[in-house]
Image (tube, rainbow, N blue to C red):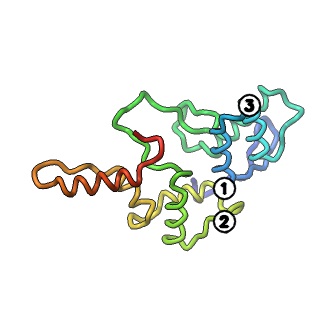
Amino acid sequence: MDLAYPLQNEIEIDGKKYKINMAFDNVLRLFDMFEDENLTYIEKIQTALLMLINDSLDNYSMQEKEVILHQIIKNTIAKDVEENRPVDIAGNPMPDVPDDNKEKVYDLKQDAEYIYASFYSDYGIDLFEQQGKLHWEKFKALLNGLTDGSKFMKVIEIRTMELPTGKGSEKRRKQIKKLKEHYALKGDD
């Protein structure tokens, strides 16, 4: 995000301009669609183009569509990703060499309730009323700026909290373990 320039809602690729739907809810649905195992790779490309630019680009080859989609994602949704770092079709950075100590601390879908409550509490923003309006970049900035006292940030704090060690810490250790289990992301071991 660069405050000196307007938010990006259009992109130019090979001399052609495309208007992009960068509403946060559209981007979140895009992520869901990319994870849908019932769709083929080709269906995902075509659906993503419809979602982002409202055009299936019927006059283009599948390879051209793939290149255009990659450029759109790389230059909008994933533009903050480090240069030359490989990304998947959703524009998400590919995992680094596995690091057993690095765990996922939040999930936009699983934590939707906490995110909603936190936006409402911290900013007075009803995310349902902002569907189709709030730009993805604004959403990310507001998410990153949530106060430590917000429900979402408290949940992240619990998930990343170290278990106490040493004599006399067994009771606190059990409490934290119970909280960690309660707020654990599905799929976490």
The vertical placement of 42 against 128, above or below, is above
Mark pair 2, 1: CA separation: 9 Å
Q: CB atoms at circles 2 and 1 under 8 Å apart?
A: yes
State which quadrant residue 188 falls in.
top left
| Residue 58, x across and y down, in percent | 88, 35
Q: Earlier in the sequence, mark 1 or mark 3?
A: 1
> Left or right: where does residue 32 sit relative to residue 103?
right
- As drawn, the residue found furthest toward the right would be 59
| Viewer-side residue, 135 vs 187 | 187
Mark pair 2, 3: CA separation: 30 Å
Identify the residue position indicated by label 3 in the image.
66
Q: Residue at x 83, y 43 (%)?
A: 55
Q: Residue at x 63, y 50 (%)?
A: 28
SS class, disc 2: loop
Three-letter code for the amino acid on which mark 3 is drawn: Glu
> Left or right: where does residue 70 sit relative to residue 186?
right
Q: Earlier in the sequence, mark 2 or mark 3?
A: 3
Identify the residue position indicated by label 2 in the image.
130
| Residue 48, x across and y down, in percent | 73, 41
- As drawn, the residue found furthest toward the bottom would be 124
Q: Residue at x 17, y 48 (%)?
A: 165
SS class, disc 3: helix
SS class, disc 1: helix
Identify the residue position indicated by label 1 in the image.
25
